[in-house]
Amino acid sequence: MALRFRKSFKIAPGIRVNIGKNGVSSIGIGPRGASMSFGKKGKYVNVGIPGTGLSIRQRIDSNVTAREQQRLLREQKKLEKLERMQRALSKVTLSLKENGTLEIINAFGEPLSRSELKLMWEQKSDFIRDWLENEMNEINGDVELLENIYLDTPHPNSIIEYKAREFSEPKPQEPAIPPKPEIEKIKPLGFLAKFSKKKKEEYELKLKKAQEQYEKNLSIWKSKKSDLLSKYNKEFSEWKLRKDEFDNKEIYYTENYKTLLQNDTDFMEIVLENAFNSLSWPRETIVSYEIDNNGSLVWIDVDLPEIEDLPQKVATLAANGKKLNIKNKPKKQLQLEYAKHIHGIAFRLVGITFATLPKSEQIIISGYSQRLSKATGKINDEYLFSFKIDRAKFEEINFDSLDLVDPIESLDRFEHIKKMTATGIFKPIEPFSK
């Protein structure tokens, strides 16, 4: 087997000597990325961009024509330009104009040139399209979640176990005790001062005053510490009593859950509050309720989201995948989306209530919204719908395929008060009342 020997070492900054089997094979001059080498095979220039894999090597001795040398210089400038371009594109900022046009700014805060944009799309097209899709989803919002909020409704006969609540009152914080005072350090007498009666008397007086001040400060500190600890111990003791009482009650509720659900309306309200608090809503939704007839009748009032809370625009990705088409949502579409959403809220609340309170047989649920009165110029609560929902009829719904159910048509099967047009416009109504 033939063995090749090659060794390279520096003889000065930027100068390297390469030694082969037969002696010095070449000498290299210059840093990485732009160097010249001299050897038996001629003189070469080496140009490259470290870390990119881009480089060129060209012979430049007397055998090389002037045209080849010019070509080498052009290649070198091309590499340098590409390096600058890649450096500028290493950190870009994407933004979206109101009309959906994409704007890309380089690291220097300047819009990309045509050639830079071309390179950017060649290298980062997937990333840019993912970004555009995220922006599209932000504009369109969670419309699907808003419209399909009723899909999470449980069957009225679902068995919901009682989940014990945690004591919400925070534990009192231990007091911050100030540091214990220290006695003032008096500098000892010097060697000569020890032979002076006056100096010794002054020194003794300083020690005495320092001790008296220390004892005074210590007494104040002890008193303050005692007050702080006494106050904390009292607060902690009272907090502990409340916590123990609460925890014991939760244990009692858990052990007697089924019996209490049939007989104790106070407990029914606690359980229903637990159930409502565990729900998550994509828009603010405030629920109030009251239990009547020993639990067989439940009144629910819902402060509904406003139509303005829904996404007002719709965005789609352009055919070329390089911009978004953004337009205002048609008024009719927005109204129908809102109508489906608020009916979905009512549908879900009814299902949760029936599943939580097995004794409940009827739910009267009414929803209202805040609207501007053209007569007074004030914001008033206006009821948009009111439904009387019977358990037996509600159980007829196919809860295994709620995606096939329209919450508007489903609730309209029950006795109701509502003035809604085919285009989703609501007029105020007087709800069912006691």
Image: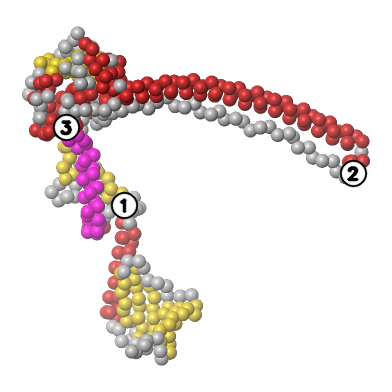
At mark 2, the secondary structure is loop
Q: Nearer the viewer, residue 1 or 123?
A: 1
- Whichever of labels 1 and 2 marks the residue nearer the N terminus, that label is 1
- Whichever of labels 3 and 2 marks the residue nearer the N terminus, that label is 3
**In-image side of 239 versus 339 (left or right):** right
- Relative to residue 42, is residue 203 depicted above or below? above
Percent coordinates x, y for residue 32 in the rendering: 40, 72
Query: What's the residue type where badge 3 is placed?
Result: Leu
Residue 210 falls in image quadrant: top right
Residue 92: mark:
1
Of labels 3 and 2, the one closer to you: 3
Residue 53 highlighted magenta (yes or no): no
Q: Which residue is mark 2?
A: 192
Query: What's the residue type where badge 2 is placed?
Result: Leu
Whether label 1 touches label 2, CB < 8 Å: no
Q: Nearer the viewer, residue 31 or 10?
A: 10
User: Which residue: 40% across, 84% down?
Assistant: 6
* Residue 229 in sight: yes
**Quadrant containing the N terminus in the rendered view:** bottom left
Of labels 1 and 2, the one closer to you: 2
**Quadrant containing the C terminus in the rendered view:** top left
Residue 144 highlighted magenta (yes or no): yes
Query: What's the residue type where badge 1 is placed?
Result: Val
**In-image side of 210 versus 433 (left or right):** right
**Residue bounds of the magenta highlight:** 119-148
Residue 69 falls in image quadrant: bottom left
User: Which residue: 35% across, 81% down?
Assistant: 44
At mark 1, the secondary structure is loop
